[in-house]
Amino acid sequence: MGKLQWYSFEEAKEIAKRRELPIMGFFMGLECELCPNYLRMFDSYPRFRDTAKKFILAAVDETDPYYNMDPLEDEHYTPKFVFFDPQSNILPFSGSEHSAQKYFFSNVDLLLGVMEE
């Protein structure tokens, strides 16, 4: 997937626990037109690549059994960005300014703001 190392969520859970790093989950729909653009943007954005070193990156699509994990089964949009601690518990964060899309970031700078907190 480019310069960054992305894992399945199952792989990310194991690596995060071993390395004691949080997980950034990128949940994308199979028909999501924006998702490939985000992946290209992540690869080409030096600030994102540097910040991503502090995370295990998980790319999760609709074929992954974790795609609809609680509480994400009620979030009917893509992409979603979810942060997990090294034990795979969802971390609280302030995502989108729209409560109906809690896990959406409209641009990489907003996402980086949360990653750098």
Image: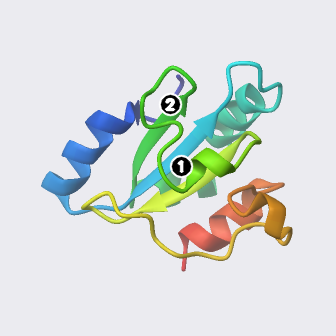
Task: Name the spot of residue 7 as percent of width and height, x first.
Answer: 38, 32
Amino acid type, callout 2: Lys
Amino acid type, callout 1: Arg
Q: Residues within 10 Å of mark 2 (few under 14, many from 20)?
A: few
**Where the C terminus falls, by quadrant?**
bottom right
Direction from residue 7 to residue 73 in the image, left or right: right
Direction from residue 107 to residue 36 in the image, left or right: left
Q: In this view, does 66 lie above or below 104?
A: above
Label number found at residue 33: none
Task: Name the spot of residue 102 as percent of width and height, x first.
Answer: 72, 64
Q: Are marks 2 and 1 in contact (CB under 8 Å)?
A: yes
Q: Is residue 54 above or below residue 9?
A: below
- The residue lying toward the viewer, choosing from 71 and 62, is 71
- The residue lying toward the viewer, choosing from 58 and 89, is 89
Q: Could you tell me how far apart the alpha carbons at marks 2 and 1 are, in whole angstroms?
A: 8 Å
Reading the image, the residue beneath label 1 is 49
- The residue lying toward the viewer, choosing from 49 and 107, is 107
Direction from residue 55 to residue 74 in the image, left or right: right
Direction from residue 100 to residue 4 in the image, left or right: left
Label number found at residue 3: 2
Q: Which corner quadrant of the image does residue 116 belong to? A: bottom right
Residue at left offset 67%, top offset 76%: 94
Residue at left offset 50%, top offset 34%: 59
Task: Name the spot of residue 63 as percent of width and height, x first.
Answer: 51, 20
Furthest residue to the left? 18
